[in-house]
């Protein structure tokens, strides 16, 4: 599959726009844990993901983290081009959670197209609406949903992503995803174990009752 | 002052677009506490605020609230036209906090212009970026900032908005703004009183030490 199949609005672009994108396009491959974007330090451009997985998260001054959303194949990473949008007044960090391959539409090209093409501008708009929705969902979770539900939802999602019921992940890392503390997560996981939902062992968490975890997360 | 002075991109619109906006424009005045938008029940259009104050908030299934942001003179209310953007997957409620006068750019006009005009599409984009930034700021506050700081920030902001140091507001209402509970807010206010920051009396809160409240909120 080529870029055209990954970029949803390709057929709506004019020949001239297509040529412009194609000639500026850069294909990159990064290792797991590579930092793709941090704060407003860089402005690479739009990233169109070919394979792999990116994680966008917010980082507190004290170094605490919370995962905002994840990006997969065919998703477009917008905030690596956040300087295109002057009204974006927040910073987030984007890292590769797996080995990831993506195309870069460089900043200059993306910025030019956004100001010139109504199709492109509306596409950016749509991507921003999606990310905004994901963050709103997360905020509602944090505000209105208790940690047990969020932890259950995280374990279920992680199991689907990794295609296994035995997760190799530390309590510290889960805490970072959920914006919580290691001790709090460990206590809750122990409670889950007592309930027969999971089996804990050094460095891994086995999901014993996927269905009940899914129910709990709803 | 006329609409042109309130609508920042007026001079960038073509004559045809200006005529279209002008002929569809509706001026409305609503009383304090009027619900302007709720969930996805309506799709009025874009609102351009002439005077007054709107509040956008999120509502939990149990009826708990948290204020997301406020809109003032010259601000544009986007989510009263959220059906324009199919990727918006969340619901919020917008109410008038004061008597408010605004122009409505009806949905049909706004939707047509967004799909046709790159200036208009980029403007919508910019407004969305601003709102997104406000929500991210709030989320960071909730995640990383303790309630005392948030409460101090709220009192300072409220005092500036109302142009008084004696706030007529219930603890219940503050709890709704901050997504907290009345008991929690009352306890914290009592602590503020002990610290000499405020003076509590039935139905009002007097700010005794504005400067220290401001310091605390930073």
Image (cartoon, coloured by chain):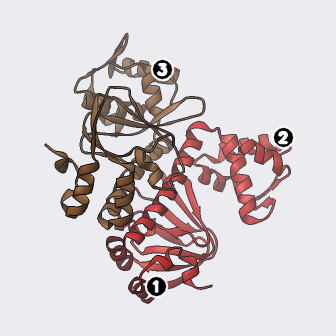
Chain colours: A brown, B red
> Splitting the image into 4 quarters, where does residue A206 fall?
top left
Q: Which mark is residue A187?
A: 3
Tell which circle, 1 or 2, labels the residue nearer the N-terminal end.
1
Which image quadrant: the C terminus of chain B? Answer: top right
Q: Regarding mark 2 in the picture, which secondary structure is present there?
A: helix
- Please state which of residues A119 and A195 is positioned toward the viewer in this rendering: A119
> Splitting the image into 4 quarters, where does residue A80 fall?
top left
- Residue B193 lies, in percent from the top left, at 82, 44
- Residue A163 lies, in percent from the top left, at 22, 27
Task: Please state if A186 lies on the left or on the right of A152 as rendered.
Answer: right
Question: Relative to residue B9, is residue A173 depicted above or below?
Answer: above
Q: Nearer the viewer, mark 1 or mark 2?
A: 1
Task: Please state if B215 lies on the left or on the right of A189 as rendered.
Answer: right
The outermost residue toward the left is A1
Q: Which mark is residue B194?
A: 2
Which chain is home to disc 3?
A
Mark 3–mark 2 Cα distance, whole angstroms, equals 35 Å
Question: Relative to residue B50, is residue B192 depicted above or below?
Answer: above
Q: Within 10 Å of the Cα at label 3, are there few (<14), some (14-19), or many (20+) other Cα atoms? A: few
Q: Are marks 3 and 2 on the same chain?
A: no
Question: Which residue appears at 52% of the width and 48% of the height?
Answer: B136
Q: Which residue lies under the disc numbered 1? A: B25
- 3 and 2 marks in contact (CB < 8 Å): no
- Please state which of residues A193 and A109 is positioned toward the viewer in this rendering: A109
Which image quadrant: the N terminus of chain B? Answer: bottom right
- Residue B56 lies, in percent from the top left, at 53, 61
Question: Which residue appears at 32% of the width and 26% of the height?
Answer: A31
Q: Which mark is residue B112?
A: none
Q: Within 10 Å of the Cα at label 1, are there few (<14), some (14-19), or many (20+) other Cα atoms? A: some
- Please state which of residues A93 and A84 is positioned toward the viewer in this rendering: A84
Question: Relative to residue A132, is residue B120 depicted above or below?
Answer: below
Mark 1–mark 2 Cα distance, whole angstroms, equals 52 Å
């Amino acid at each position: 599959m080529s870029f055209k199949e990954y970029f949803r609005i390709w057929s709506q672009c004019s020949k001239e726009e297509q040529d412009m994108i194609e000639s500026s396009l850069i294909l990159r491959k990064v290792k797991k844990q590579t930092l793709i974007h941090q704060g407003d330090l860089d402005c690479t451009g739009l990233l169109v993901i070919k394979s792999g997985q990116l994680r966008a998260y917010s980082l507190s001054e004290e170094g605490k983290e919370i995962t905002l959303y994840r990006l997969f194949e065919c998703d477009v990473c917008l905030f690596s081009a956040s300087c295109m949008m002057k009204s974006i007044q927040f910073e987030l960090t984007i890292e590769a959670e797996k080995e990831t391959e993506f195309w870069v539409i460089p900043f200059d090209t993306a910025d030019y197209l956004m100001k010139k093409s109504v199709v492109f501008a509306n596409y950016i708009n749509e991507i921003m609406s999606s990310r905004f929705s994901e963050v709103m969902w997360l905020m509602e979770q944090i505000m209105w949903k208790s940690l047990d539900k969020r932890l259950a939802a995280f374990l279920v999602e992680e199991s689907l992503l990794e295609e296994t019921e035995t997760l190799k992940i530390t309590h510290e890392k889960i805490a970072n995803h959920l914006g919580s503390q290691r001790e709090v997560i460990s206590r809750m996981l122990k409670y889950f174990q007592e309930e027969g939902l999971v089996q804990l062992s050094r460095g891994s968490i086995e999901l014993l009752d996927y269905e009940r975890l899914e129910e709990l997360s709803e």
